Amino acid sequence: MNAPLGSRGSPSPAIEAGLAGVYERCLPERDGQVATYIPELATVDPEKFGLALATIDGRLCARGDSETEFTIQSVSKAFSYCLALELLGREEVLRHVGVEPSGDAFNAIVFDPRTQRPFNPMVNAGAITVCALIYRVLKDDALAFVLERFSKAAGRPLRVSEEVFRSEAETGHRNRSIAHLLLNVGAARQPIEPALDLYFRQCSILVTASDLARMGATLANIGENPFTGESVFDVAAVRDTLSVMFTCGMYDYSGNWAMDVGVPAKSGVGGGVVGVVNRQLGIGSYSPRLDAKGNSVRGLRAFRELADEFGLHAFECTNYGSELVRGLA
Ligand code: DON
């Protein structure tokens, strides 16, 4: 069924009903395991499930634990990439991080053999490089900048969980190794510790499913938060970010995701997933049980069902896509 998404300003019974149905159908899904490799993440309630959808005309529909805070983790990588593109320009960022799907796990210690650069900004190696680039420009103001922009996208002030940050900083030996290899291949420069600190802190920012939906809607609305009217992200950077989310956002599940769901998305081991339907809406989900690839099991199912329910897939026959050709007629 392809329910209409409603017109600007109108109520949205179709969205409310569709979202409620998806939530109820996904609630019994209990497969997967909560992440434990960051000790603090093991303490979350595995039963939590929140689902939210935000339209680019500024309406939010939410179900379940949509206001429960959790750490953003890798979902942050999409937004910080967008900020790095704005700060350093596309060319400079591309000199340090590629845009090819790696087909590897998010924490793989592997670089593109041709360029000796991280494959893309959605895997840890690429995201740490992005943090190094942001740090290079902003130095000690980097975290405040990232927090401010993430907050503007969410439409409320966000903060870092010091507990999760400390937990990851103390146990993140693999990421520390990756950071030193980045120095070795010349993708990042010294000092690398502040870049790692920025990476661990940005991953520890607390968000809700509703925040993710609004952040997604800000990307869908070419960088302007539709709830506050504030300009948050650079338009050209949004286009590039969505492209990389589409091809690499779900790690070594990205190809399947493109086929099944067909929206740019990014997941995190905290259990969050953000999705963006270009020029239409943002979707946020939270459910902390993960599959072996580090993606939320219930979140994946909810996105699959939402895509079917509302016909969200980018290449769904009901989606018109670009207006250009029709505009020329
Ligand atoms: O670097 C890490 O291991 C975490 N801070 C983030 C990893 C993550 O969220 C991967 N996503 N599925």
Image (cartoon, rainbow, N blue to C red):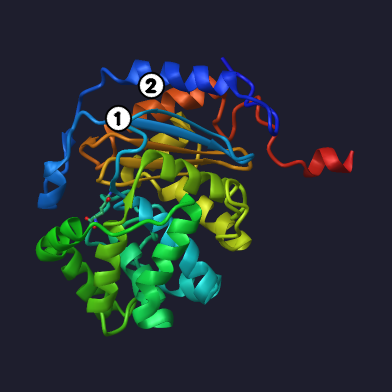
Q: Classify mark 2: helix, strand or loop.
A: helix
The answer to whether the residue labelled 2 contacts the one labelled 1, judged by CB atoms less than 8 Å apart, is: yes
Q: Quick check: 87 above or below 262?
A: below
Q: Nearer the viewer, residue 128 or 55?
A: 55
Q: Quadrant for the N terminus, please.
A: top right
Q: Is residue 115 visible?
A: no
Which of the two discs, 2 and 1, labels the residue nearer the N terminus?
2
Task: Say the numbered circle drawn on residue 23.
Answer: 2
- Snapshot quadrant of residue 6: top right
- Pointer 2: residues within 10 angstroms few (<14), some, or many (20+)? many
Residue ID at (37%, 61%) = 119
- In three-dimensional space, the C-alpha distance between marks 2 and 1, rounded to whole angstroms, equals 8 Å
Give the side of residue 203 with respect to residue 303, left or right.
left
Q: Amino acid at mark 1?
A: Phe
Give the side of residue 293 with respect to residue 228, left or right.
left
Residue at the disc numbered 1 = 49
